[in-house]
Amino acid sequence: MQSFCNYLGILARFLPVLWLFGLGSIALAQDFDEEFAFETAKKNILCKTAQFLINQQNNNNNQVAVDCQDLKSLETTIPERFKDALWLVRRFKDKRYETYGKGKLEARLDKLTTDLTNDLRKNKKNPPNWEEGFKTLQADWRKLRDEVLPNGTATTKNQATEEDKNVAANKDNAATQADNDSNSSPKSSMLIYFILLAMMGGIGFLVYQNLQLKQQMMLLEEDLQERYSRLDNRIDAMTPLKEFKSLSLKLVQTNDQLSTLMQEVINLQVKTSDEERLSPEEIYAQRTAHLESQYSADVQIYYAKPYENSHYFLPHDFRTEPTRENFFKIEMHLDDAQQVFYRIVDRSEYQNLPLTQLDTTLKPYVELMNHLNNPTRILTLEPGVLEKKNNAWVITKKAKVLLE
């Protein structure tokens, strides 16, 4: 009988330890239930949202049904033509918002619905009745969120806790009565054992918290890398570095040419006397005289402008000097009225318009002998031939040009 009582006393000493491990198991179950509740609510919310987008695209004609058993089934049952719904499910199916930590189920679900709201409102082509349907969808979101929150079970949990306390108190009374029949040596050994178990539980809890913190740090780092990658892409799109370098080289080259020209003007002004000093316009004319062929007595020269996607020139637009638009040089031989030729003006300052509008102002009038990206100059290899018809000079043979 005495040994049986001692056995009951030892069993009673183990009851608090078992009760403590039971509470730990309940806590772990609560953590697992929280993740399960979040995934369940997320699945239902995404299902409602996908059905809403499908109905909106389908003019509220409920003929398309999706499988909401799980996220994979939902993704596979959405038809490919409903691209908005399919894109939304794929975007949010893996988001968990674990950086909020444990016990933040409501905050995680609110973040999910906020992100969904922002993405849905970005579409500027929503129909007029879209807002009313969206308000109904938001109400469904709140209902699905409230269904998984643990607020409704708080009273039941408190009652269960009070019952556990009463049971533990009764067991402690029985243990106290059994301890009166035992000596002090088992008490001290069980106390040490309990302290060791408590320390092991504390170490395990610290290790668990450390792992959770590391996981949160990894998620934050991934989020920051994603944001910075987006920023880098935007910077690359807004600052075309290659074009800037090319433009910079062109500016330096132009500046050098201008400096050389100004130095020649200064030298000419210094060398000549006051009576013979040339103006800048005369100096520029002397420098560019070799770029244009000289006028002759038996040749009349005009400068014509092109017309988009045409193959003729009109005499009323002829000029005696080249301009930005009149860059086609027409040579009329006075001794032979049938001999009328045309070419591109050789001077590069008048070639900006045809170089920038090759398809509309140059290709209809000439035959390109080569093709270049971003050419800087046009050379006439063989002049074209014109014939006058109905008060217009029509091209009978296109000029052949080369791009440099």
Image (tube, helix red, strand yellow):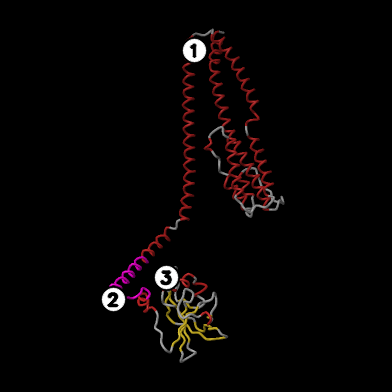
Is 268 in the magenta? yes
Inspect the image, locate mark 1, and give the three-letter code of the amino acid beneath it: Lys
Residue at mark 3 to residue at mark 2: CA–CA distance: 39 Å
| Sequence-first disc among 2 and 1 | 1
- In the picture of the structure, the residue carrying the numbered disc 3 is 376
Is 178 in the magenta? no
In this rendering, would 182 be left or right of 144? left
How packed is label 3: few (under 14 Cα within 10 Å), some, or many (20 or more)? few
Inspect the image, locate mark 3, and give the three-letter code of the amino acid beneath it: Thr
- Circles 2 and 1, Cβ within 8 Å, touching? The answer is no
Secondary structure under the numbered disc 2 in the rendered image: loop
View extreme (left): residue: 271
Quadrant housing the C terminus: bottom left
The answer to whether residue 276 is above or below residue 338 is above
Of 170 and 389, the residue lying toward us: 389
Secondary structure under the numbered disc 1 in the rendered image: helix
- In the picture of the structure, the residue carrying the numbered disc 1 is 187
Q: Main secondary structure of the magenta part?
A: helix
The answer to whether residue 103 is above or below residue 133 is above
Inspect the image, locate mark 2, and give the three-letter code of the amino acid beneath it: Ser
Quadrant housing the N terminus: top right
Q: Residue 309: x and y, percent?
A: 55, 75
- In the picture of the structure, the residue carrying the numbered disc 2 is 273
Residue at mark 2 to residue at mark 1: CA–CA distance: 125 Å
Q: Which residues are magenta?
A: 254-281
Of 264 and 8, the residue lying toward us: 264
Q: Nearer the viewer, mark 2 or mark 1?
A: 2
| Sequence-first disc among 3 and 2 | 2
Residue at position x 54%, y 76% in the image: 307
Q: Residue 14: x and y, percent?
A: 53, 18
